Image (tube, rainbow, N blue to C red):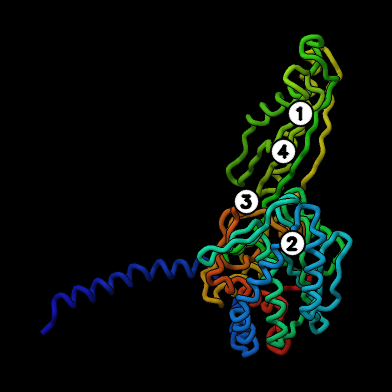
């Protein structure tokens, strides 16, 4: 006898499967890998040495986290990364890399030698933090979550890089192309990517780049948001607000500029933004300001739109000085315009080999890959030069990024370095197993 309730349950279950199936199929069809990438990862993931490396990364999780804590305890404020760099130099030297050294900019790099063939892959994690000198970096732990400024951004990236290097050594994997591993300076704020700019200026043979930054192990950042930052300073004669009334004011000139900047319109696509981030100036409430300055940030996913907005901005700040002078029949107000940040925008196709490789590596560790929107990271520089680049995160979950309440949850964090490990093997190749997916430029 047929049980009616059982039939209803079975039919409901079948209906649920049929309802979900098209959505799953559509998701699979949304991003497809080339046969070459598929075949490469079939070959790579079948290798006992690769499994050994992946198993080591998971087993090494506690050691990597301990190293992360040690690295984060060393202050690395903007433009003062020297202490952390010196420590990282020792760690890279102990990892078995060759040619470990610090360059003139302060970057610390070592090389994993391949078989003597290109391509050459650069893998880097930034050593600087946003926190000024004197910030309390004391670590606290609550319910397994680590709390300390910089513990995620980017002490986690630096520790993950070292863990990946160890995995190569333990597994005995020899790449085809050389891999250059670096801790770089100047990623944050007014550091203006000075570390990676120096790396690509001084190493013309780099064919591809992976930045280790952020913690979301599923995400792939492959587009670069450009930004220009300016310090604008107005100067005038200054004087007593009553006795010298009629003199032009540096603050009033800056105010004219800010009011006009605030009324500018930007496109929503490509996303283009701006803000006057800080202002300062003046002597006292009863003084005509002799000096006033502001810091301006402008960003866009398009270099063309960024330059178009920049032209409008520069025109406004110059006219504001002229208008203030005209108002008071003077020529005493001057304006000094200084570019203090230049992060170029950059694009590449979503099906670029380096993106496909990152996707395949993410799938291979059991995660669901996600293409992220444009961002401002160390990948900006290589992408602006036409060099394939991605930013891959180091695992775990961060909260309060760039604040003194920053925290990091280590749950399943080993998936980050596992994915990076597999992406590197795919791009650089594995001697005797797979040719490099990354093309020589």
Q: Residue at x 78, y 11 (%)?
A: 245
Q: Determine contact: label 3, label 4, CB under 8 Å.
A: no
Residue 401 versus residue 55 in the image, above or below? above
Q: Quadrant of the C terminus?
A: bottom right
Residue at far right of view? 104
Which residue is under mark 1?
A: 281
Q: Earlier in the sequence, mark 4 or mark 1?
A: 1
Query: Element type at marker 3?
Result: loop
Q: Earlier in the sequence, mark 1 or mark 2?
A: 2
Q: Nearer the viewer, mark 2 or mark 4?
A: 2
Residue at far top of view? 243
Which residue is under mark 4?
A: 296
* CA neighbours of label 2 inside 10 A, class few (<14), some (14 to 19), many (20+): some
Query: Element type at marker 1?
Result: strand
Q: Earlier in the sequence, mark 2 or mark 3?
A: 2
* CA neighbours of label 4 inside 10 A, class few (<14), some (14 to 19), many (20+): many
Which residue is under mark 3?
A: 403
Distance, label 1 to label 2, CA atoms, is 34 Å
Which residue is under mark 2?
A: 74
Q: Residue at x 61, y 46 (%)?
A: 271
Corner quadrant of residue 285:
top right
Q: Where residue 418 is drawn, which disc sits there?
A: none
């Amino acid at each position: 006898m047929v049980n009616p309730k059982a039939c209803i349950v079975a039919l409901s279950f079948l209906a649920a499967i049929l309802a979900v199936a098209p959505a799953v199929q559509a998701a699979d069809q949304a991003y497809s890998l080339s046969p070459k990438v598929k075949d490469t990862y079939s070959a790579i993931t079948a290798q006992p040495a690769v499994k050994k490396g992946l198993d080591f990364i998971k087993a090494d999780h506690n050691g990597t986290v301990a190293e992360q804590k040690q690295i984060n305890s060393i202050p690395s404020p903007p433009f003062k990364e020297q202490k952390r760099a010196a420590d990282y130099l020792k760690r890279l030297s102990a990892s078995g890399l060759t040619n470990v050294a610090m360059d003139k900019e302060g970057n610390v790099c070592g090389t994993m030698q391949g078989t003597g063939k290109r391509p050459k892959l650069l893998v880097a994690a930034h050593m600087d933090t946003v926190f000024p000198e004197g910030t309390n970096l004391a670590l606290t732990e609550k319910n397994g979550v680590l709390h300390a400024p910089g513990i995620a951004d980017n002490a986690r990236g630096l520790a993950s890089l070292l863990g990946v290097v160890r995995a190569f050594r333990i597994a005995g994997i020899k790449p085809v192309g050389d891999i250059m591993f670096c801790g770089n300076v100047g990623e944050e704020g007014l550091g203006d990517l000075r570390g990676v700019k120096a790396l690509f200026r001084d190493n013309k043979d780099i064919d591809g780049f992976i930045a280790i930054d952020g913690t979301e192990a599923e995400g792939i950042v492959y587009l670069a948001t450009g930004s220009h930052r300016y310090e604008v300073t107005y100067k005038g004669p200054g004087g007593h607000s009553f006795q010298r009334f009629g003199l032009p004011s540096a603050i009033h000139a800056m105010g004219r500029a800010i009011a006009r900047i605030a009324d500018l319109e930007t496109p929503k696509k490509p996303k283009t933004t701006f803000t006057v981030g800080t202002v300062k100036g003046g002597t006292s409430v009863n003084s005509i300001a002799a000096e006033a300055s502001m810091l301006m940030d402008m960003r866009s996913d398009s270099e063309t739109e960024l330059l178009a907005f920049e032209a409008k901005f520069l025109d406004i700040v110059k006219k504001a000085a002229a208008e203030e002078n005209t108002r008071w029949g003077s020529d005493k107000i001057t304006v000094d315009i200084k570019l203090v940040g230049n992060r170029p925008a950059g694009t590449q196709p979503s099906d670029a080999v380096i993106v496909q490789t990152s996707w395949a590596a993410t799938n291979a560790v059991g995660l669901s890959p996600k293409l992220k929107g444009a961002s401002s990271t160390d990948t900006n520089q290589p992408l602006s030069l036409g060099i394939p680049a991605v930013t891959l995160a180091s695992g775990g979950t961060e909260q309060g990024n760039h604040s003194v309440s920053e925290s990091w949850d280590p749950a399943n964090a080993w998936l980050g370095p596992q994915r990076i490990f597999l992406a590197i093997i795919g791009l650089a190749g594995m001697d005797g197993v797979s040719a490099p997916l990354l093309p020589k430029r």
